[in-house]
Image (cartoon, grey):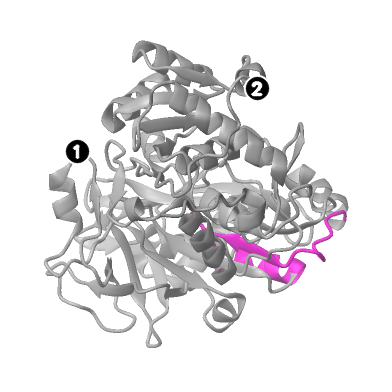
Amino acid sequence: MTAQKFISLAELAGQDPNSPAVRDDFKELSWAELDRRVSALGRGLMELGLLEFDHIAIVVSNRSEFLESYLATIRAGFTQTPIKTNWTKDQISYLLKDAGSKAIITDIAEAKLAAEAASLPVIDVDDGFENWLNQQSDEPLPVGGRGYRIPYTSGTTGKPKGVSRVFDVEVTFEQWAKQNAIGASALNLPTDGWHLMVSQMFHGAPSTFGIGALFGGAPMRIVAKWSADKFAGWLKEGVTATIMVPTMFRQLLALPESERAAIDPSNLATVLHGGEGCPVKVKQEMIDWWGPIFSEYYGFTEGGMTFASPDDWAKKPGTVGLPIGNMKVDVVDDELKSLGPNEVGSLYFHHPTGKYFKYMNDDKKTDRAYLSNGSFGVGDIGYLDEDGYLFISGRTAELIVSAGVNIYPAEIEAVLFEIDGVLDAAVVAGPDEIRGEQPVAFIVAGKKSSGEESTQAEIADAINKACQEKLASNMVPRRINFIDEIPRDPTGKTLRVQLKNELFGNN
């Protein structure tokens, strides 16, 4: 039997081995250099005695070593999980135990402590990494490695759980690279120019889509930390695409006019965004500024996903689009009966093969996620319009139940973001002795579109008038709290628990 030929990363991406593949804030690597480092890292892990499908935790900040670790673990045939770099030692220790990790790659102090407590070998990308890497064989890794990522849920409604998908183990590295490139193309990510990685790379969607763009031929520019006032400089490096969250849009829109004028988006072909809902007003302001280059995705760790092209959103402002691939979306009521167009209910995705994922070490949670027909849901609420386009109302865990009536914070927030002078906003459930719960708004005040300062009293008055005009009476926020910043995790999701803790702590 003829041995399969090794295909380099440059060949997979259709690029010259000597052309740039990745650049971070400290160095630039060619495709040939990236190939060598990926092979050496994979061989070094093998030398530690790790076997096929052994689990490796990646706790690495935004730098080329994250990409090297990601590619090496999959190409060498291991399973891996990128872990949030802001997690505590205890949080990381939980995942290491739950996943049965055999090694950890990191530059984070808390991760090193967790690895020490678990007696796991550590590849420290900050301490002696270059010497260690140069001591490893850079012989190309075996062809057909079937490593894969085991993503963990965010843990917003309990301990994070690993998601194991039945198809992942069947895909070779070479097939995986091609599939990712096809997926990136379907999301309008270009193959020319630099792909700017401004999101934290442990976040699944940006890293997956960014790596897809990489295998499509677009080199990756990794920035260590997002900063709105540095965005203009990054764009000048030949950036043609990036993946962002709406929080970044708000920060860019809030820049002084002189700094906004320095941002030249003319070379940008696509800005892909997701991770949290984007208010219609915020997105429209970005479109007015940069043009119709914004594509949107909605999805979750378990695998369901929708996509809205710029044309889709122009026709259906606020939509997160249509399901992609073979997925179908169903909206059901509390009795699990399918609802009609524009009726709000629980969202379930259906894959033709039925139950195609499970939560590791938690069969009960797996069973609860599925309906009898194999459709799965994760607690999101929304509706389909008459043309099948999906609109998100929120999550079950975010629901406000006032006098027995469900109120969706996203509907109230949509009104708040339309108000001149509201820079950021979030709505949570506050206590109400009569109704049980009431909507409470947290507001970050900013300048008006005219550039004038707005007082809290003016904004509060505008909020009351707009909400009374556009919302049912029980949805009008009974309290308005002004704060300096809405707490969000590194992926941009609102940390509503923190707001509720602050709220209840004040009562």
Say left or right for 30 vs 442. right
Q: Is residue 245 above or below residue 157?
A: below
Q: Amino acid at mark 2?
A: Asn
Q: Quadrant of residue 449?
A: bottom right
Cα gap from disc 1 to disc 2, whole angstroms = 38 Å
Can residue 361 be seen? Answer: yes
Relative image position of residue 476 (x, y in whole percent): 40, 61
Can residue 469 be seen? Answer: no
Label 1: state its secondary structure: loop
Q: Residues within 10 Å of mark 2 (few under 14, many from 20)?
A: some
Residue 69 numbered mark, or none: none
State the quadrant of the N terminus: bottom left
Q: Nearer the viewer, residue 46 or 150?
A: 46
Q: Is residue 72 magenta?
A: no
For discs 1 and 2, the disc positioned in front in the rendered view: 2
Q: Residues within 10 Å of mark 1 (few under 14, many from 20)?
A: few
Relative image position of residue 385 (x, y in whole percent): 38, 82
Circle 2 is placed at which residue position? 134
CB within 8 Å, label 1 to label 2: no
Circle 1 is placed at which residue position? 361
Label 2: state its secondary structure: helix
Magenta span of residues? 262-290
Q: Residue at x 37, y 87 (%)?
A: 386
Q: Residue at x 14, y 70 (%)?
A: 373
Q: Nearer the viewer, residue 244 or 211?
A: 211
Q: Earlier in the sequence, mark 1 or mark 2?
A: 2
Say left or right for 33 vs 173. right
Q: Residue at x 23, y 68 (%)?
A: 353
